[in-house]
Structure formats: structure tokens, C-alpha cells
Amino acid sequence: MARSSSTPRSRILTRALGISTVFALGVTLTACSAGGSDGSGSDDSGSGTEITLWQYYGDPDTPTGGPLYDFIDRFEASQDDITVDVRFIPFGDFNRTLLQSAAAGDLPDVALINAFDTAAMADAGVIEDLSERVDEWGEQDAYFPTSWETTQVDGATYGIPHLADAYAVYYNKAMLGAAGLTPPTTWTEMEETAAALAVDGKSGLAVSGIEGAEGATGLVIRTLAEGGDLAEFDSPAGETALNSFKTMSDSGAMSPGVLTWNEDDVKNQFATGQAAMMINSATYVSVLREENPELEWDVALLPKGSEDQLTFLSAENLTIGEGSENADAAWDLITFMQQPEELATYLPERNKLPARDDVPDESEDPVRATFAEQLQSAWAPEGDLAAVSNDVFTHVQRALQASLSGSSSTADALKTAQTGIDEALAK
């Protein structure tokens, strides 16, 4: 099996929000053929077929890429007919590379894509309709509805959910205990608790607010807690959410640094005790355990607003390149990678959660159990919003930037963001 030597992408979770700007420009491609690694592969999975798999997790020697390569090794060892040539493409280049390869008729047999890109990739003729295969397979009902919905385009199935991730609240047990506090269960409590923990130059809550879509995650989660619709961000829900973050920034509960922090930076703030709480995904569970074994921490569900708190679904889908000459072998790989017993081995290594409800979890890990519970209330953009979600979340982040920096009032920041969102949705 070929193993890439490219440089790994440092911020994995941005992909949960990333939608290629190519799609926002309305680029549409005609269906193009994919020919495996050299265009000469056979569609008979019993004839010694090599298939190609493109992914953006990382190289085999990285924490995010390594488990995937090990997974592929187990697939190859399970049978004698199919080998897999894995190519790592950094996330920032992934969608563009797929689109260019479609135009050249050189698509991979399997592409592991951002779940929210599925509709755009289907519309662009990059990936195949898997509906007939899925109907024969018959396991679609095992998937959580939010995850499965990301594979649906105009009533047809264009992918299989690979895995899932969710955001929750990490908290420093020692810092909260010393202050006589417990993890907040509402956003009002979060504002008060974070402010009380902001002492000696430390912040109470850390979130990513960096420029771009990644920096919108915390504010998106806060807006969802008020029942907000991101397509109508300039609303009472959006106003409440933005004012909440402004309140925490002004009180010192959140550091001004949030506007420059990505999710790795947020983890570092929490790991070094500079932040008592952080909103982040399950990706960092093993990282904290391995890199900061002395840190006393735990995880709690996201606080509620006026409605139950939804988390942001981070996910990828397994797809087959349009016109693949090795589609049967590609499907064999995809279905192997969705066997519950195989996922039970793979997912803990990736610090991820299953997208289906029949994966055994023998770890008895209470932290993973909290994330799994939070995942039951997952939200993902759908339809027109999904196709331009990268643009929409970028406008949400700009509202956060304007409000927290003081360059704009909440009302003006929301109005400006809504104008950009409306333009993105109209494309």
C-alpha cells in the first residue's frame, strides 16, 4: 500500500466547517470517469484490483492519518483481491484537486470528503449515486439521522457516513473545585462561571474565534442554543448569542486572544491552565491524556439556552468517484470500513464517534460517553445552507470579530453578516 509523504494539516477540525469556495462560485462539472491508480483497473473485485483512496487526514506517521492507514492495512489483510493506494491531500487543496481531477477524467475510486460537501460534489458530477448499492446493502437505518442526511441529494444517496465528532465543554476540575463551582448547565450560568474563573490573568472560557469558518464554531453553537437559524443570523437568536459572547469578552471571562486562536490554540490554553474551560471536539481527548497526564479535567454537555443545546456535527463521508472502473472493489472497501466491529477498533484510535448506533463500545470511557450523549443532539447545515456553509460561517465569524473588537455594534455586526449570508445563499 502506498503511503504519502506530504506534510500533514495541523488543524483537523476546520474541515468540519470547510466548504470549497469553488462551490460558492457555482462551478459545475460534467460527469467524468475515474480509472483507479492507472486507469486500467477492473471492476471485478476478484481479479487482483488496485483502487485509489484520497483523504485529508494526514500521513501514516501522524495521529490523525496513522489510524486510517492501519484501517486500510486490516482491509487488505482481510482478503487477497484488492489493494489500496492511499493519497494524502491537505485539506485546503482537497476540493480543488478533486474538481480539477474530475475535469481531467482522473478521479479516485474512493474519496473521503467533508460531509457538508456531498451535495456540491454530487451536483458537480464528481461522485456516484450509491442508491442501488445502499438499498441492496440495507444498513442505512443503523445511522443517526443527522449523519445520514448529509449523504442525501435530491432523494438519492451519494455517500456513506464514515465517522462523527461533536463539541462539548472541557473543564479543569481543580480550578472549578477551588472556586466552589460546578460545570454550567445554562448559558447564563456559563457567563457567570467563566467570569468568576477569570482571575490572575487567566480566562474562564476559551473558544476558537480565528478568522474564517473555524472561528465561527463557538458562536454557531451559542446561536443554536437559542433556536437560531444560521440562514437568518440577524435575528433575536443571533443577537442573544453575539451579546452573550460580547458580555464574556468585556468581563474578561473570555480572553481577547480568542480572535486569533484556532482549535489547537484553544487546546493549548486549556492544557496549560490558562483557561478553566474550553469548547472543543473529541479530537483532543487522547491528546490531553498523552501530553498532559497531570491535568485534572473532565467533559460536560454544552449548556442550554432558551432551548436544548445542539452541538455542531463534524463528519466525513465515504464516496465513490463518478465513473470509477473499480466501483465494486471501492464498495467492498467502504462497507468493510463500516462494519461495527471494525469501527470499534478504529474510532477510539481517531478520538472520534460512530455515525451509526450499533458500534460496540467496550472502553467504558465516561468522557467518550459524554461526547456520545452530546452527539444525540447534533446539528448540521442542510440543503442550500450546506452548499455555502463555509461562506456563511465566515460571515458569522466576522460579526464576532467586529463585536468583540469594538469596531461595530451588535446590531450593525449582525446586519453586515446577514447581507453577506444572503448574497452567499443567492449564488
Image (cartoon, helix red, strand yellow):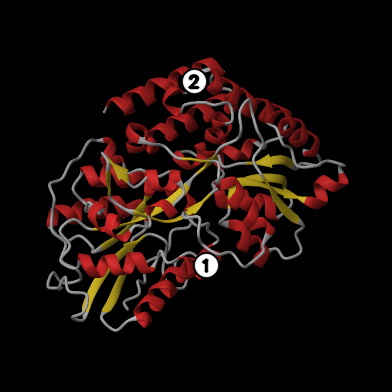
Seen from the viewer's position, the closer of residues 407 and 38 is 38
Query: Is 301 on the left or on the right of 51, as rendered?
Result: right
| Neighbours of disc 2 within 10 Å: few (<14), some (14-19), many (20+) | many
Point 44% across, 43% down: residue:
146
Q: Find the distance from the CA under tag 1 to the CA under tag 2.
A: 43 Å
Secondary structure, mark 1, is helix
Question: Observer-nearest residue: 372 or 394?
Answer: 372
Above/below status of 418 relative to 401: above
Q: How many marks?
A: 2
In this view of the protein, which residue sits in the foreground, 178 or 141? 141
Mark closer to the observer (1, 2): 1
Q: Is residue 49 above or below residue 132?
A: below
User: Residue 344 bears which disc, if any?
Assistant: 1
Quadrant assignment, res 102: bottom left
The spot of residue 253 in percent (x, y) is: 72, 34
Image x and y of residue 212, in percent: 45, 39
Q: Is residue 11 visible?
A: no
Seen at 51% across and 64% down, the residue is 347
Check if mark 1's residue and mark 2's residue have beta carbons within 8 Å.
Answer: no
Q: Which residue occupies 21% across, 77% down?
A: 49
Q: Answer with left or right where residue 320 lies relative to residue 313.
A: left
